[in-house]
Amino acid sequence: MTIGAVITTMIIAAAFGVVAIQRLGMSDAEQMLLLLCEAGKKNLDDLFENLEQNVKIVSSYVESDLGGVSDEALQAHIDRVSDVFKRILVKTNGIVTYYYRIDPAVSSSVKGFWFVNLDGEGFAPHEVTDITQYDTEDTSQLVWFTVPKATGEPVWLKPYITDNLDVRVISYNVPVYFGEQFVGVIGIELDYSAMAAQVNNITLYENGYAFITDADGVIVYHPHMSIQELETKEKAPYGIISSDSIVRYNYKGTEKLAFRLPLINGDLLTVSAPLSEVNASWHKWIAVIIITFLALLFVFIVFIMKYSERITKPLQKLTEAAEQIDEGNYDCTLDYDGKDEIGALTNTFRRVTENLKKYISRLNDLAYADALTSLHNRGAFDIMVRDMQTQIDQPEGPLAFAVCMFDCNSLKQINDEYGHDKGDIYLKETARIICDVFEHSPVFRIGGDEFVAVLQNRDYENREALLRLFDEKCSEKRETETDPWKKVDVSRGLADYDPQEDKLIDDVVRHADRAMYENKRSMKCRQTEGTGFEA
């Protein structure tokens, strides 16, 4: 019965460990795929959005400038649009051509222009394609012209070989109308390799990669396919085409895990990795646990009767630890340090637990970071408050710390008058100065315009000097900067923890908040230099 009980306990402990590691391993892999896919999507969307925005800017100018469709009016209009294009695209990377083509039905003599930059040395005029040689009602040919004409809407086109240049490009095109009359098309062609470079940068494990498909599942770009293969319009493997963001599929006998996100041009970015590589990390730990448990099982069977009392207690702790890990508690304590087999098992389990905690810590770093300023967010502050409350409730003695609250004045006015992007600059500059001054203290962004720093040790001892330094730096920014959003105008309030009066950390926070608002009231009589805003 004793041997049977030991075997059963070990199997249960191993099962809990395996389940916990498997769940965490898969969750970590899915999170990694998601982060890579989101990063790749952002880079590609930025590339496409920049191109699309440039075309829209020119399109807006074209609509306002086009005053007629006579040859003389069109030619003058074309010259002005060409100048606008040159100014807009002077620092734009990846664009190989831009054009404004007039429909032959509107004018037989004014054809428009086509500028090309294949060698990276700058745009130069190129002989335009003779549109009269094509049927402009047939959207299967001369797609950059016929598709916008047919749809009457701005359109992203799938990659194609551009006429006369033999270069694969992606283009965004906008039809031009004078009243109800179709006049022509303006567009920009992006070098296909610019998109490919962004996708090729997405790699993971040994054989993971990213590729792009259109909404119908046709592969638009794949790092392992040549342009000739892509021109065959091959579809992605069965299973990829799904409404789910994360999918599993089989490609040439290999099971794969993939994450998919839509791009602004209508295509989808897919980040894929073999399941065998995804599972390799947690498979390794499961193998270690199984091998260790099997070895110890043999030893226990031989010596169990003699050492049953010594074995029962540590095995019970291991079982409890495995159950805690399965429930999500990774801070379990295993204090058995015996030099026997149970000690080896405990050490192995402890190392497994420490690795699990590292994985969780990585995920928490992402969850508790403020996206704009990279500071800790409100969730991280709540956790720190909880931990410090636990410490001050201990009988060992009170902590010595202070809380400093900060509030950005005039943020709403800056957002309203100059836009939220300028308000973001204001917030980032405020965060930078707080971190520069209180460099040894954790700093949190706990609201839209509110920050808090918890001062301990060296910063606590020098808190008054640091507060004066902060005011000096803010004053210096207000005096030297001319842009309102770069003038740091911040109210602040400091409160020390008093163990006689403050029973809760929240009491200190309230004192600091009250001091901050008193500081704000005292600043209201001051007009911020150069902004016109009240403090």
Image (cartoon, rainbow, N blue to C red):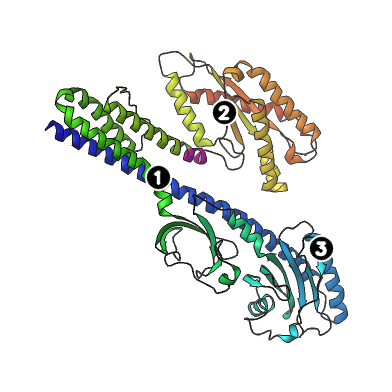
Q: Is residue 23 magenta?
A: no
Give the residue at mark 1: 25
Along the viewing direction, whichever of 119 and 145 lies nearer the viewer: 119
Residue 324, position in %: x, y? 31, 34
Proximity of marks 1 and 3: CB atoms separated by less than 8 Å:
no
Secondary element at image label 1? helix
Q: Quadrant of residue 352?
A: top left
* Category of crowding for the residue at label 2, using alpha-carbon neighbours closer than 10 angstroms: few (below 14), some (14–19), many (at least 20): some
Residue 426, position in %: x, y? 69, 39
Residue drawn at the location 67% of the way across and 28% of the way down: 436
* Region of the chain picked out in magenta, as a range: 362-372
Q: For the view shown, which residue lies furthest in the left direction?
A: 1
Is residue 171 shown left or right of residue 330?
Answer: right
Give the residue at mark 3: 86
Of circles 1 and 2, the one toward us is: 1
Secondary element at image label 3? helix
Secondary element at image label 2? loop
Q: Quadrant of residue 68?
A: bottom right
Name which of mark 1 and mark 3 comes first in the sequence. Answer: 1
Is residue 341 shown left or right of residue 396?
Answer: left
Residue drawn at the location 40% of the way across and 52% of the way down: 276
Along the viewing direction, whichever of 523 and 202 lies nearer the viewer: 202
Give the residue at mark 2: 442
